[in-house]
Image (cartoon, grey):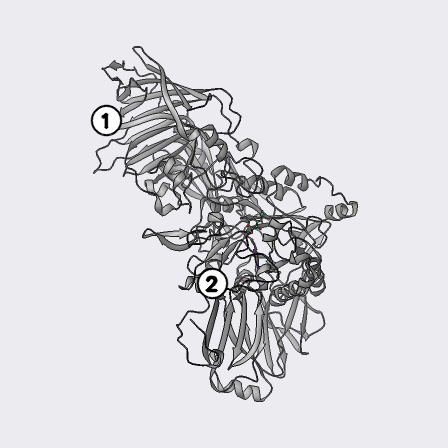
Amino acid sequence: MDVPDGFASGAPCDTKSIAVPSHWQLEGYGAPQYTNTEYPFPVDPPRAPRGPVGSYRCMTQVPPSWLDAVAHGARVVLRTEGIDSFGELWCNGTLLGATVGSRLPHEFDVTDLVHDGDNLIAVHVHQWSAASYLEDQDMWWLSGIFRPVTLRLLPSGLPSDVRCHADFDPATGDGILTVTSDLPAEVGVPQLGITGSTGEPISVGMVQPWTAETPRLYDVQVTTPAGTVTQRVGFRRVDVSDGVFRLNGRRTVLRGVNRHDFHPDRGRALTRDDLLDDVLVLKRHNVNAVRTSHYPPHPDFLDLCDEFGLYVIDECDLETHGFVDFGWRRNPSADPQWRDALVDRMRRTVTRDRNHPCVVMWSLGNEAGTGSSVSAMATWCREADPTRPIHYEPDQNTADTDVWSQMYPGHDAVSAIADRAEPALPDVHADAARRGKPYILCEFAHAMGNGAGATAEYLRDVERSDRMIGAFVWEMFDHGLRTSIDGRPTWGYGGDFGETLHSGNFCCDGLLFPDRTPSPAMLDWAALNAPARIRVTDHEVHVRNIRDHRDTSDLSYRWTITDESGNEYDGPLIIPPIARGASVTVALPVEVLDIFDAPHGELAVTVHAYLTNETAYAPAGFEVSNSTAEIPATAGAEDDTAVAVVAPTPTARTLTVGPAEINRATGMLTRLFGNPLAGPSLTLWRAPTDNDHGGGLNGDLTPVATHWSRMGLHRLTHELLDLQVDDRSIVTMVRSAPADSDIAVVTRAVWSAQTDVVRCHLSCTPEGEWSHPVARIGWMLQLPDWTGDFTWWGDGPGESYIDSRNGTRLGLWRRSLDQLHTPYVRPQENGQRSNVRWGELQATDAADVTGLRIAADRPIGMTVRRHSLDQLARAAHDSQLEAEGTTWWHLDVAQHGLGSAACGPEPLPQHTLMMQPQALTLRFTATG
Ligand code: IPT
């Protein structure tokens, strides 16, 4: 559409209406584009290409009372909170100026331009500008007026710039309030009965300090003869002393996530409800900190963090990551002509957000290299606000920062840092300075697809050493945009919107699916950070309060016992309040011990901690943590191994042993309890996860998924080497190997049966050189399409893997096959239930199948699903998975860990699965 010359002053024009705030690409104009570090236009700073321009107009009324106020000296200000990327603004046809800094506010004085009645505000928004070079964050390129625009009246004589520093002295418990303002004023805190004046520290006596665990806020009134301005404050002190990051004098651990503003329909144009949802989901999952990667968030988010209690690292809107591809040549961070632009961004960040108690650290930006312009930001920031430490990740010499920050380091390196034993920097002064600073993992645990693994190991190092500030998982959301492919609703990622340059599904790396449903990784992180860390034994319960600032008087406890038949017992458990950082041990109640003493099968005893009363973020009874112990069966429990076995009977093509029928040519089952069935076939592959595909900081290592395909793990064929029958059993030897390879695994299977039980003892031995990890070691059965539920006695209810299983626990669980599937945005291995003693596919009335239970002689991983590994590995979107008329049941002795290799390290050595001899005995029974 052509914009007429008089557009800004109201010339007639063929306009369409569009919701504001919004991104025009999500309102039907143009298309979103996702790149990680790549600039979506030729790099020639500061020149940016001409790109799309969005021309907006809106009429707004100015109330007559405002004009009266203006007549008495009031000012009217037009404030924009976010325009991406460059906006030119007009009021009633007069050009106000321009704004850049997409996630930063800008104010224009329009006092002399507004009049009674309708006023026309016009804005041209340019998608690209020189400022786009500073905004190369890993996210969708989305344009427009995406945060609120407001007209505000600033009455004459009323302060318009109030700064509150609400300090807390941990030695005395007193608050010290210093208010500075553009006009001298009286200061009062009615809740404390305190008055004073601007410009001088006011001792407010004993206050309840603000922490994320106790987010106590007070209203400060700043009064001049013209009226009162109210500012909410929280009294707290952040400092780094003796190399320790402290809040209110106490070491405080940040248990964090990296958060972008994101919504699958609205992009970064969020509503207050979206922001509230985010805060609630974080609080309910025991997260206590957010790094606002990589720009200041919607301003309301910080209000909610103040109110609900979340620590915030507030990051400036700066990233120039794409310059890495040119050896950082012409990077604005090191180019003086950009200095003012960078400092201006820092100034606007700090000025906007400095009154928020939740902000405990400033971050200069992300991945923008280092250089004099970044240093100038730090200098400005330190002078303007000496009350908060400065963070900036690429600064590995900590020249500009108060804390040392890294992303995705290996676990050993982090352990050494926790021990203050890291390798020295070449410059002795820089080394000494860095050694004295606390350390933060501003990003770790790349939660892309299925993963990340090993968060527990990193957290252990963070907790054990007071040098460590905390750890922030990358990241909160899968940035999948709602769209459809072939008529089916889908989460779209890079390449789904016609982009030629894009970074695929690298934007789907969050703890929450795009619709904010928690993924298994979120449950893992939540369990690790639960305020009450519980450990149960067969006679007592240990609880540690891992909070830094408050006791556990808000929590109550109960115990439950479950057995594998579904019997449940429960009762209250009295645990006295535990001081911050302390532990208690209490004996299990007598009722529990009585149950343990009576004859029983295996039991799961769980202690649950829950909120006694309703809180701002969750209802009374909300479970904050739990922990389960396994109580072995008492002696004399049922054992049928001694029952007489039936003899195998041969036919021309098959061998039958009790309810099992085995094909003589393949050595595999063809029928079991009347059900057609195939297997068990050795399986060493999985549908590679995003982390298996690697490509991260360890990019020079060959990803495991590549090894797997080179080894041919996805195309094993199975050949019967030998079959022996005697009057008690059938013994098969099957060699599994890929074509054109001399590696193989031989499985020996010994089949025996009683009238209604089939047993199979499986053992496997590798041949040849297995020098790389394998995905899994296990066997797979193929069954008819199953409509009944799956029930299991093992860890659940969600999926788990060896290095990500803190969010699950032993119990008796039942789910439909569809519920067992975790809908990762890009399909991949998923759905394993770990530590399973037995699993059962239940028959339904309608189906012509017999229910089947498989028990293992050792806890194994079971994965049951409707999709083949091949299909899972091939499909690009979950919505593209098709039913295949078959059910696959994996019985895995072991699976390779998940790790973080899409961006960080591979699984830890103890979670790395190398081929080795394995044995497993399975017991099959029919269940009606
Ligand atoms: C790191 C980025 O800071 C973050 O924005 C995101 O892109 C993440 O990687 C991967 O998802 S930078 C990388 C060089 C470690």
Report x, y in % for residue 28. Answer: 39, 63
Q: Which residue is mark 1?
A: 674
How would you rate the neighbour count of disc 2 (Cα within 10 Å): few for under 14, some for 14-19, many for 20 or more? many
Q: Is residue 245 left or right of residue 95?
A: right
Q: Nearer the viewer, residue 293 or 876?
A: 876
Q: Quadrant of the C terminus?
A: top left
Report x, y in % for residue 423. Answer: 71, 39
Report x, y in % for residue 613. Answer: 47, 56
* Residue type at tag 2: Leu
Q: Is residue 505 left or right of residue 48?
A: left
Q: Quadrant of the N terminus?
A: bottom left
Q: Nearer the viewer, residue 4 or 892?
A: 4
Q: Residue at x 26, y 35 (%)?
A: 843
| Residue 21 shown in magenta | no
> Where are the magenta residues, as a range?
289-297
Secondary structure of residue under mark 1: loop
Mark yes or no: residue 298 visible. yes
Report x, y in % for residue 808. Answer: 45, 40
User: From the viewer's perspective, is residue 383 above or below residue 558?
Assistant: below
Of labels 2 and 1, earlier in sequence is 2
Q: Which residue is mark 2?
A: 270
How would you rate the neighbour count of disc 1 (Cα within 10 Å): few for under 14, some for 14-19, many for 20 or more? some
Q: CA distance from mark 2 to mark 1?
A: 56 Å
